[in-house]
Amino acid sequence: MSELTIFYLLVFSGISLISILIKSPFFQKAKYYFLGFFFFSIGIFLHSQNSDKPEIPTLKEKENIVFQLSKKLNSNEKNRRYFVEILAIPSNDIKDFSPIKTVLSIPKHQEPLDFNHFYNAEVYIHQPEKINNDFQFDYEKYLARQDVFLQAYLPNDILKTEKTEVSFYDQIRQKRLQILNKINQTPLSPKIQEFLKGIILSDRTEMDSETVQDFNQTGLTHLLAISGSHMVIIFWMTLFVFNQIIPIKFRKLSIILSLVLIWIFAVFIDYGSSVMRSCLMITCYYVMVLLQRKSDLLHSLALSAFMLLIFDSKQFFDVGFQLSYVAVVGIWWLSGPIKKLFRKPKYWLEDFVYSITAMTFSAQIATLPLAIYYFHQFSFVSIFANLLIIPLSEIIIISSLLMVIAIAFGMKYLLVFQIFDVFILYVLKVIHWLSSFDTLMNKNLSLGLLELSALFLMIYFLKFIIKDIFNLKYLLRFSFCLLLFFGLRIGFNYYNFEKEEVLVHHFYKDKIICVKKKNQLVFWLKENKNEEKIIDFVINPYLVSRRLSDFEINYYPEDSESFVYGGKQYKLK
């Protein structure tokens, strides 16, 4: 929006907010909508302030840069990848040079970067490639939301200079790197080492693709990320320990110390988005307990989201942010009614199993529409995988935390390592076995915003159906949402079926041409060149966007200038 539009929005929302003071029946009823509109306008204003792109200086394709490490990213087969800050460009005489955040790829044979040094190297630098089609993943926008506007590749040697003064924050991050390196030196098997780094230290940068795929296909990715469940378990563990040490009359002190410890832990693991969300939710909830206010999960949830978005409105577009809050809202909305479907528990273990089952089903149901909308896949095995692994998550997280603490202090009790190694190895084998049920995996699922909204409406009314399945009013509302969903789906499917088009896709230097005539779809590409990657990054996203499942691949020689298909000639150059 333009600055003038945002200004008018703020003025109008401010006036509407004052109107809630008017003691008129109309304004008293409408005050909640005015209040919502006011916060919506504030959100638009804050997001406009956060979305300003800084001025990027004109750079040559090959530049000599001085930089420092900002964050490790996931590696690929050939390169390690980092977020780095470009501190200076010696060849460029720029006054008041502001650091530029950049994605940097470095071959794996090069020495890993750390936080104790400045680096000087010659790199190939460019801006992220713009997308040409609406169905492609917009990597440029994804990076921009993290204030990253450049990409670079460093093929040659690096000169490094030790920092004369390392900031306190960089010292903490360097200590984390040292512990990650210590884990590599333990007798644990490589797969278990990477699992341990991911589940406690939020570092999945070197995890093998097979393990990541197993967790993705079984819907257990949240176990690898430092999520709300991790922080709650760590908080409860520290609270339990403090409650045993500190007298009952100082129980508030136990809560305060536990909150302080989880925030220290959050800073130590580089306070990722999921960690900050979890810590804020827990803090908001227990601050109410400390103030002897009625603790309310929904209020804690809303307050933590409000605080996060005030400081960084771009998080609203983060998939993890959306999934986290939708999952917690789903648990709040559905877990109670689902748990009441079970018989009244007689033992604490039975109550625990019922609670875990209800929470798992609630979170799965609530996040299912978003998961399909963003990832275009769903596996029925994820429900069973979560029911099986979630009860074990407390043991897995606590034992992993204790292992990391032991490694950090230089302890090397081989027996303990062997027991942990065998335990986690069997857990990973079970997850791998569950991921092997390919028939239960549905891929290339398409879902639009209107269909997504209809599904969320269905989930809203589902609570009332569970409570009273024979209530005609609730059945009719749920049925209307179901019919609306299928009506929208049939309409969008028919629209895409009738569409005929010829598109040119670019994958690096390859040119892929697709010809669509209703449900007939043919892709033309160079013979056997990057075919697997082209299917993953070009063909599958196109199939999802056009709601198709069948396609054909034809090949053309490298020296071809055109090809003929369906009586028409298509030029390649």
Image: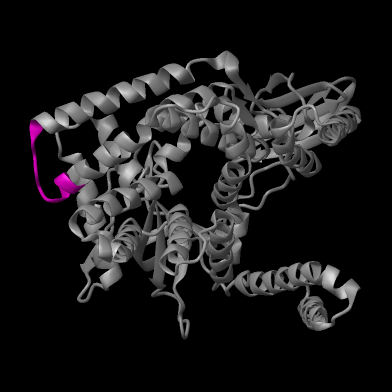
Residue 5, compared with residue 462, is above or below; it is: below
Question: Where is the C terminus found, in terms of image quarters?
Answer: top right
Left or right: where 544 falls relative to 162: right
Residue 413 part of the magenta-drawn span: yes
Q: State the image coordinates of residue 112 (x, y, percent, origin top left).
A: 27, 51
Q: State the image coordinates of residue 192 (x, y, percent, origin top left).
A: 27, 32
Q: State the image coordinates of residue 391 (x, y, percent, origin top left).
A: 40, 31
- Tell me how many marks there are: 0
Left or right: where 351 falls relative to 484: left
What residue appears at the point 53 percent right and 36 percent down from the top-left corner? Answer: 359
What residue appears at the point 60 percent right and 48 percent down from the top-left corner? Answer: 329
Residue 7 part of the magenta-drawn span: no
Nearest the eye: 95 or 34: 34
Nearest the eye: 126 or 540: 540
What residue appears at the point 39 percent right and 66 percent down from the top-left corner? Answer: 64
Left or right: where 418 falls relative to 236: left
Nearest the eye: 330 or 545: 330
Q: Residue furthest bottom?
A: 95
Name the image quarter holding residue 183.
top left
Q: State the image coordinates of residue 308 (x, y, percent, origin top left).
A: 54, 65
Question: Where is the N terminus found, in terms of image quarters?
Answer: bottom right
Residue 221, compared with residue 554, is above or below; it is: below
Residue 235 visible in this rendered orientation of the protein: yes
What residue appears at the point 82 percent right and 78 percent down from the top-left corner? Answer: 16
Give the residues in magenta: 405-414
Residue 315, compared with residue 190, is above or below; it is: below
